[in-house]
């Protein structure tokens, strides 16, 4: 099922006991008893097969075998090792487990008799049309980790007693490791108890003793024989754990959860402590807001959690249902053929219809566009006339602006020249006076003064080159004129230093 199809299931989940046909409806975080035949046909139906109906085995397959051939290789090896009857139909599933062997891959394999599953589920099938998910009871525990009810760290052991079955399951790091059907169902406990006390106790009365008084019965004879019975049970469980720890390299079991279909057994934690050396936890998980109002068989709780986990993963690897809901019509061969025919018919009619519709659409668009064009053309013609008039006006204004600009530039240039001559241009007599004063201070003689348009050129001489240098330096420090000199030369005949200096006006 595709994920979008699961939305109709997520609101209603119906868990079903295949033996008693008791069913619970889980919807809007509430759980309640439900008559199976009155269930909504679109609910998600989940059930289980008992641990004793499941054959478990571990096989190793060479790593050289490609993944596409793994299924066939496992089935061949399982038929051989378990001596399965080739004339019978079996449902074989498997999960890969950790392997330290570099040459082989390890798999936990689960085998069920297809005919047995059909017989077990037939009473359910008679009341409803489909069973969406069916798995074995030990695998339901996986949902506790998938839905974050229990943290996956460590090794956890689960022991659960049902009326006609019992099982032990071990998970490590939230992953399945080992499971086994136990010989001590509640019915078998009752038979053994009756044998011990030498009288017949009705099964319902025995169940009532366990659920109300537990292992601390007020009847001393009952209590003594219950202690004897559960001593045998826990010795048996301890033997199973020893085997599992040795076979699967388990050093230590961190937690053990113990529960039953009829509720917790008072005093059972003492047996777990004495025979297993472990503190037991109660196998009781509340997921509904009204689930504390009465005790609910925890297998129903696990089935509901498993259904929720299935919505998220769509993992059918451990789904043993043979009455699955058929795929949507669109995914069936008949549906695909019907879809093809309908599509062909639609395609054959689509082009003429498209042409007709598109032609009408284009006519509407053309009419609207023509109308818009007429309006726009009228507006643009008026705008063009206005722009032409504005252009002529602009040219006249530009001519006037140019004439005025030319006048302005002429007057500005004339004023600049007048300012330069009248204001900015220094008086030549003042310049000469400053030059002579500096020459006298430095004892430098000035010769050959020549006035040009923008400069005054003159020569100076002195017997000391330093005096000439001091004169030039002092003249430059005035920062009034642009002073430049070519070089200081020496007249060997006269024994004088001479330099030509130019001052920019």
Image: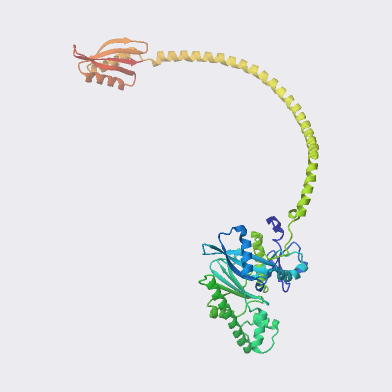
Q: Tell whether 115 sits left or right of 248.
A: right
Residue sitting nearer the eye, 254 or 70: 70
Asked if 329 appears above or below 474 in the picture, the reply is below
Residue 115 quadrant: bottom right
Residue 99, horizontal then vertical, whole percent: 53, 64
Q: Tell whether 88 sits left or right of 273.
A: right
Specify whether residue 307 is in view.
yes
Q: Tell me the colour scheme of the image.
A: rainbow
Q: Tell whether 243 sits left or right of 2.
A: left
Asked if 306 appears above or below 180 in the picture, the reply is above
Quarter of the image that includes the N terminus: bottom right
Asked if 456 appears above or below 328 in the picture, the reply is above
Residue 44, horizontal then vertical, whole percent: 71, 63
Residue sitting nearer the eye, 107 or 7: 107
Specify whether residue 290 is in view.
no
Residue 344, horizontal then vertical, whole percent: 78, 45
Which residue is depicted at the point 31% across and 12% down?
457
Residue sitting nearer the eye, 167 or 429: 167
Residue 122, horizontal then vertical, whole percent: 75, 69
Which residue is depicted at the point 60% across and 58% down?
67
Which residue is depicted at the point 33% across and 10% down?
451
Quarter of the image that includes the C terminus: top left
Image label count: 0
Residue 446 quadrant: top left
Residue sitting nearer the eye, 271 or 497: 271
Residue 206 quadrant: bottom right
């Amino acid at each position: 099922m595709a994920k979008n199809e699961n939305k109709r299931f997520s609101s209603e989940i119906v868990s079903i006991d295949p033996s008693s046909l008791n069913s619970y409806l889980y919807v809007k975080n509430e759980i309640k008893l439900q008559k199976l035949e009155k269930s909504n046909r679109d609910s998600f139906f989940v059930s289980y097969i008992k641990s004793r109906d499941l054959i478990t085995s571990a096989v190793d397959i060479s790593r050289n075998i490609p993944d596409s051939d793994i299924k066939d290789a496992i089935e061949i090896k399982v038929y051989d090792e378990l001596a399965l009857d080739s004339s019978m139909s079996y449902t074989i599933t498997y999960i890969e487990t950790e392997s330290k062997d570099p040459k082989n891959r390890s798999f936990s394999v689960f085998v069920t008799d297809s005919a047995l599953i059909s017989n077990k589920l037939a009473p359910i099938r008679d009341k409803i049309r489909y069973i969406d998910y069916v798995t074995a009871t030990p695998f339901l525990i996986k949902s506790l980790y998938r839905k974050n009810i229990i943290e996956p760290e460590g090794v956890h052991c689960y022991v659960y007693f049902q009326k006609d079955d019992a099982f032990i399951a071990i998970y490590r790091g939230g992953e399945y490791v080992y499971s086994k059907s136990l010989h001590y169902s509640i019915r078998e406990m009752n038979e053994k108890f009756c044998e011990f006390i030498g009288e017949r106790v009705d099964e319902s009365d025995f169940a009532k003793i366990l659920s109300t008084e537990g292992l601390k019965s007020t009847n001393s004879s009952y209590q003594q024989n219950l202690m004897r019975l559960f001593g045998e049970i826990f010795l048996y469980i301890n033997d199973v754990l020893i085997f599992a720890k040795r076979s699967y390299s388990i050093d230590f079991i961190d937690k053990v959860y113990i529960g039953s279909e009829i509720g917790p057994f008072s005093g059972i934690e003492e047996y777990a402590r004495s025979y297993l050396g472990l503190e037991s936890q109660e196998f009781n998980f509340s997921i509904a807001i009204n689930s504390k109002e009465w005790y609910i068989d925890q297998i129903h709780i696990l089935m509901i959690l498993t259904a929720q986990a299935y919505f998220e993963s769509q993992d059918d690897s451990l789904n043993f249902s043979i009455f699955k809901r058929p795929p949507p019509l669109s995914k069936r061969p008949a549906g695909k053929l019907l879809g093809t025919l309908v599509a062909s018919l639609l395609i054959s009619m689509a082009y003429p219809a498209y042409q007709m519709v598109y032609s009408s659409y284009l006519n509407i668009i053309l009419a609207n566009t023509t109308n818009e064009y007429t309006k726009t053309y009228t507006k643009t013609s008026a705008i063009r006339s206005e722009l032409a008039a504005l252009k002529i006006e602009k040219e006249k204004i530009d001519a006037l602006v140019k004439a005025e600009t030319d006048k302005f530039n002429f007057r500005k240039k004339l004023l600049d020249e007048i300012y330069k001559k009248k204001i900015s241009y220094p008086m030549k007599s003042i310049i000469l006076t400053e030059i002579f004063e500096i020459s006298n201070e430095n004892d430098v003689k000035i010769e050959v003064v020549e006035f040009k348009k923008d400069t005054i050129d003159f020569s100076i001489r002195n017997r000391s080159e330093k005096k000439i240098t001091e004169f030039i330096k002092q003249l430059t420090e005035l920062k009034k004129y642009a002073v430049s000199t070519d070089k200081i030369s020496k007249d060997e005949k006269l024994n004088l230093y001479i330099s030509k200096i130019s001052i920019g006006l």
